[in-house]
Image: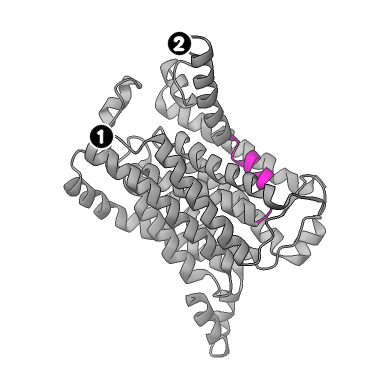
Amino acid sequence: MISDFLYSLKDINSFFNLFYYISFRAGLSLVLSFSFVLLLMPMWINIQTKLFPKGQPIRDDGPQTHLSKQGTPTFGGVLIIFSIIINTIFWTTEFSNFNYILLLTLILFGSIGFYDDYQKVIFNKGISSKRKFFLQFLITILLYFIIISNGYDLNNFYIPFFKNISIELGIFYFFIILFIIIGSTNATNLTDGLDGLVSMPLIFVFLTFAIFAYILGNINFSDYLLVNYIPGSGEIVIFCTTSIGALLGFLWFNSSPASIFMGDTGSQSLGASLAVAAILLKQEFVLAIAGGLFVIEALSVMLQVFYFKTSRGKRLFLMAPLHHHYEKKGLTEQKVVIRFWIISFLFCLLALSLLKIR
């Protein structure tokens, strides 16, 4: 929107030619999104403290060190979403439907998260898992038809490591989409259990997809690297960089000891957005690799539940998700967070290496 207007001024001054380039708009959107959250977050924290003085409820059966977090404001995700929406709209070209689908995903899944966070703050208990999954299921169906109505191919699943080799799945691809979106949403949510833990891995994964989107949206780069060219997909870079900027601004306040949590509002919306970005870019396998930390955290919960039920009450881990297991073993929160950041960074490097495996 605003980028189109500024670019139209190129005849007045050649400086405005810069707004044609995705790389320039991406950098600008990142800095402005970061600044937006950084400047408004203190006010947002004060507003929440007055509106919801009880803040985030803390589980009694968790690590004892977490009891001090009781009362921490938990709607940080609202400001993250707000910043992403504003800056993505400002710096995306008006003909890009990719980002508007991603923004719709962000808003819809953010609404589920907000509903859950609100229930926790007011009634000390979030919505049930069944209701949460049902709402996620309905929204995924809605997104599926919206994406199809915009002319995107949701029939072919591209095989990793090969150039433009795909399997036509037809309607069965819907079930893959269902698994990816709901899986990514909840895996990201499960990872958000320590101060700063989920923010940096999300930044790494969004950066990974920004690189993929830039390459897939450029016919020369995609041809050189033997990946499928997707016209217009380069604009997804803007969504990714605004998300990175917002998360960096949030991390400023979420680093230990956290002044605010992103809540389900942030974790669910960002996890779902990553999944939809992967689907639009035909890089579902890359999401599984780059988001490897989220996968591990989700698997730890599933294995814990399965083992508990089949072994008559025994536990595979001291506590799930996995980050709590290491806390129970005596590692400090900061050490667990930094080590998980390193793991996430390595997963993203591995995902980027797939660009040359063709």
Instruction: Identify the image quadrant of residue 330.
Output: top left
Please state the extent of the stretch shown in magenta in the rendering: 281-292
Please, is residue 216 above or below residue 173 in the view? below
> In the rendered structure, which amino acid carries the disc numbered 1?
Asn
Q: How is the image coloured?
A: one colour
| Residue 323: image location, x then y, percent | 47, 26
| Residue 197 in the figure: left or right of residue 213 | left
Please, is residue 13 above or below residue 39 in the view? below
Question: In terms of depth relative to the viewer, which is nearer, 251 or 319?
Answer: 319
| Label 1 or label 2, whichever comes before in sequence order | 1
Q: Is residue 153 magenta?
A: no
* Residue at the extreme front of the image, as rendered: 171
Q: Residue at x 52, y 65 (%)?
A: 100
Secondary structure of the magenta portion, mostly?
Answer: helix
Name the element at disc 2.
Answer: loop
Callout 2 environment at 10 Å: few (<14), some (14 to 19), or many (20+)?
few
Please, is residue 308 above or below residue 88 in the view? above
Name the element at disc 1.
Answer: loop
| Residue 183 in the figure: left or right of residue 34 | right
Please, is residue 317 above or below residue 191 in the view? above
Residue 124's disc number: 1
Residue 69's disc number: none
Q: Residue at x 38, y 46 (%)?
A: 113
| Residue 112: image location, x then y, percent | 39, 48
According to the picture, the residue beneath numbered tag 2 turns out to be 313
- Disc 1 from disc 2: Cα separation: 26 Å
Callout 1 environment at 10 Å: few (<14), some (14 to 19), or many (20+)?
some
Q: Is residue 282 magenta?
A: yes
| Residue 238: image location, x then y, percent | 55, 62
> In the rendered structure, which amino acid carries the disc numbered 2?
Gly
Instruction: Identify the image quadrant of residue 258.
Output: top left
* Residue at the extreme bottom of the image, as rendered: 12
